Image (spheres, rainbow, N blue to C red):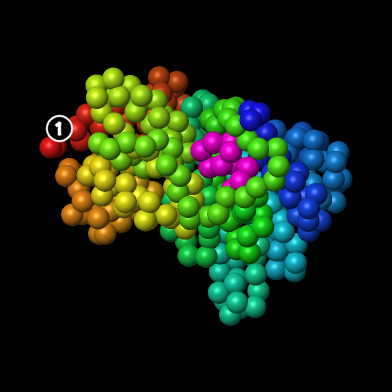
Amino acid sequence: MREITYAQALNEALRECMKEDERVILLGEDIGKYGGIFQVTAGLLDEFGDKRVIDTPISEAAFVGASVGAALTGMRPVAEIMFIDFTTVCMDMIINQMAKMHYMFGGRGKVPMVLRTNIGAGRGAAAQHSQSFHALYVHIPGLLVAAPSTPYDAKGLLTEAIKNENPVIFVEHKKLYVEKGPVPEESYSIPFGKADIKREGKDLTIVATHALVLRSLRAAEEVAKEGIDVEIIDPRTLTPLDKDTILKSVEKTGRLLVADEGHKTCGVAAEISAIVAEEGIYSLRAPVQRVCSPDTPVPFSPPLEQSYIPDEKNLIPAIRRLMEYT
């Protein structure tokens, strides 16, 4: 199978959905002629025109609000927010409008829209362009939250998100855009709420999201030299969350490590840990461990930023600590 990048896979999903359904429109800053800051929308303006690929003013509240209105009246908008940091300026539109309209109108109004954005540190972009607070949207009823870690998942999940009847927060990772992987040329979708076992193992379960899936795979190969067999679960969507796959894995291995680039306090890793504590505690042979970002802003200093980012330097010691419990 051919290999393409994560960014190209997203671009392909957008193109296929726009060809299939003329109601699909794109809105965002610099998504047209420039092709998006990470080139995810490159070439789409030339193909579909400026009525369907709309370069917006620098007002996230305005174009996310316009997307909510368009979705309510029959369109299927895909709005791009350059960085998740910038979603803070349109929180009312996301939390009080996008998420709640279906409920507040008794099911008579639907908001089939996608809000694409990204998380992740590591590009020297400092504290206001590097955050990973996707857990905020997992907390809000009415929103679906997708978190692809591979090009294959990126294309399939975005196709599903655009065709879904519910509002979706589609959370990409800026360090993954250049990663390559096998992706079918034909259109396909991946159902929400179905986790993927990226690596099978018997000694320890890692539930990892986004870039930490790849980092966990590298850590697993390293500890395999010590005879430790790690299973890696990628939830793929955080809302809905595939609890059954996680609980079955923990039942098999007896140990759980949750890895997510969000902050440790009240984050995605905290929620998954709580679920296992509530519903799978008798399967555990060791305390649940979390590998997350520290509860501080992302540093600008390159050495501090590298220290801040959760990766193999944190994962491997955590795996070894868990294996001390027999």
Which of the image's four quarters has the N terminus?
top right
Q: Is residue 66 visible?
A: no
Residue at the (85%, 41%) spot, across then down: 47
* Disc 1, SS: loop
Q: Is residue 242 visible?
A: yes
- What percent of the width, then of the height, locates residue 183? 63, 35
Q: Nearer the viewer, residue 206 or 185?
A: 185
Q: Can residue 166 be found in the magenta stretch?
A: no
- What percent of the width, then of the height, locates residue 257? 29, 40
Does 50 sit left or right of 138 as displayed? right
Q: Nearer the viewer, residue 248 or 318?
A: 248
Residue on which the image places disc 1: 324
- What percent of the width, then of the height, locates residue 223? 29, 24
Residue 164 sits above or below residue 212 on the image? below
Residue at the (55%, 74%) spot, across then down: 103
Residue 101 sits above or below residue 308 on the image? below
- What percent of the width, then of the height, locates residue 305? 42, 26
- Report the amino acid beneath label 1: Glu
Residue numbers of the magenta segment: 148-158
Residue at the (69%, 52%) spot, across then down: 78
**Residue farthest to the bottom, as pictured:** 106
Residue 34 sits above or below residue 107 on the image? above
Residue at the (17%, 43%) spot, across then down: 286
Which of the image's four quarters has the C terminus?
top left
